[in-house]
Amino acid sequence: MNGSALFLRYAYAPNLLGYCGPADTGALLEFGAPGRAGTGFRALAKQFEGAWPQLRTIAAATGTADPLDGEVVEAYWIGNRLLDRAGDAEGGLPHHSFQVFCLYPWANLLLDERRTEHALQVLDQCRIRWGRVITVSADQVVAESRPLVWDGTRLTLGVPCRETVNRGFDGVSLIGPLHPGDWVSMHWNWVCDRLTTAQLVALRHYSAYHLGLVNQRLGGRAGTSGPRIQ
């Protein structure tokens, strides 16, 4: 898939909420929806201070000329073979889950009881999560997914539950038709894409890998040994 259009699907939700990226969400949509990878969209993508450096890292490590190459963009948001050549000395990979669990401050705030609930909510919504479609309407999807849970020393995935997420607005959608049973990726309160089996496996794998890293750190800070991901 065109890298610009794919980047938009994952970056649009936090940008719309005002968390990252350019102030002009309309411009991001205008350039990204048709997959226009010109200087206009590139300038907007560079304003995502978390994602853009990671895209550059993947591109540089794999000899890819364009950080907005479709496979590079997929590697960052979902995960693929490119990440095997782009790790760092600390064991983290330039995947969005590393950004969320290991670089952002929210995981550390779980240890502060005054902030635990809010930190857990942000971590759960900010990560790229996966779910199975239950029902589809014009602008929304009900999907079943496993939320993050915190037991005081470790982050794990809880029992499946249903959530309602947006797939478009005013009849405009960034993805094609969805059907009950489809597996999809979600970011904040939006559906990003329909996942192939390989993409679902990759997203689960890299998410679990970085959950393992953050649990080792949090477990140590809580006075226990680092737990293993089950």
Image: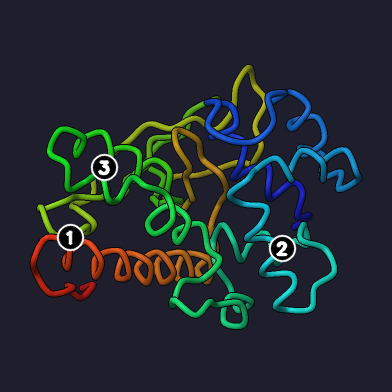
Of 127 and 34, which appears nearest the observer? 127
Residue position marked by numbered label 1 in the rendering: 154
**Residue at mark 3:** 120
Quarter where residue 227 is shown? bottom left
**Label 3 Cα neighbours within 10 Å, binned few <14 / some 14-19 / many ≥20:** many
Disc 3 marks which amino acid? Answer: Leu
Tag 1: residue type?
A: Arg
Point out which mark residue 56 bears.
Answer: 2
Q: Is residue 167 left or right of residue 223?
A: right
Q: Quick one: label 2 or label 3, which is nearer the N terminus? A: 2
Disc 1/disc 2 C-alpha distance (Å): 31 Å
Residue shown at 48% from the left, 50% from the top: 184
Q: Nearer the viewer, mark 2 or mark 3?
A: 2
Provide residue 103's location: percent of width, then percent of height.
44, 56
Between 22 and 177, which is closer to the camera in this rendering?
22
C-alpha separation, residue under disc 3 versus residue under disc 1: 11 Å
**Residue shown at the point (43%, 43%) measured from the top left:** 126
Three-letter code for the amino acid on which mark 2 is drawn: Arg
